[in-house]
Image (spheres, rainbow, N blue to C red):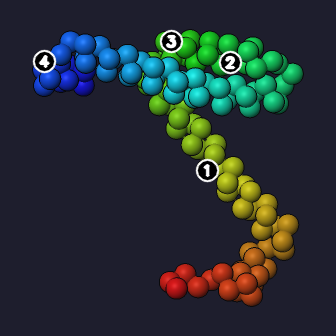
Amino acid sequence: MSQYLQLRFKSVGLRRLASVCQIISLVLIMAVILYAPALALSTVTSLSSWASVLIMGSICTIYTTIGGVRGVVYTDVLQTTVMFLGVVVVVVMGSISVGGGAQVWSLAVQGHRTQFFE
């Protein structure tokens, strides 16, 4: 995109400004993306926030470097599968605790939650 700006407006300064803005944007986005799981890790364990950030950053960097994009895709598939199965387990366990599928359906009918097309 910055090359387009240089060709369109014939300005090297504008190209550099666009590059700097893009770098700042990516650094800020990566900071948020890295901090969110690090915060979860530090909340669950007794690690400090800085240690969690360093651990998460190191693991992600090594994993991506060794496994490449294919490894990341496999991890995404595995994570999606685990999340889907988790939702199914929660629905099944919730249905069992309420009294079964028939009881869930009767409660839905009583609460007028079965009107799908209105």
Residue linked to disc 1: 84
Residue at 79% across, 64% down = 94
Q: Assign a secondary structure to mark 4.
A: loop
Which amino acid does the dot numbered 4 rest on?
Lys
Residue at 31% across, 21% down = 18
Residue linked to disc 4: 10
Look at the image and tell me whether residue 102 can be seen.
no
Q: Where residue 66 is drawn, which disc sits there?
A: 3
Which amino acid does the dot numbered 3 rest on?
Ile
Position in image of residue 49 (x %, y %): 76, 20
Are the residues at dot 3 and dot 1 in contact (C-beta closer than 8 Å)?
no
Instruction: Please report whichever mark, 1 or 2, sits nearer to the chain's N-terminal start.
Output: 2
Residue linked to disc 2: 53
Which of 25 and 35 lies nearest the eye of the viewer?
A: 25
Residue at 56% across, 12% down = 62
Which amino acid does the dot numbered 2 rest on?
Val
**In front of the other: label 3 or label 4?**
4
**In front of the other: label 4 or label 2?**
4
Instruction: Please report whichever mark, 4 or 1, sits nearer to the chain's N-terminal start.
Output: 4
Separation of disc 4 and disc 2 at Cα? Answer: 42 Å
Position of 11 with respect to 18 (left or right) is: left
Are the residues at dot 4 and dot 1 in contact (C-beta closer than 8 Å)?
no
Q: Assign a secondary structure to mark 1.
A: helix
Separation of disc 1 and disc 2 at Cα? Answer: 27 Å
Which amino acid does the dot numbered 1 rest on?
Phe
Instruction: Please report whichever mark, 3 or 4, sits nearer to the chain's N-terminal start.
Output: 4
Separation of disc 2 and disc 3 at Cα? Answer: 20 Å
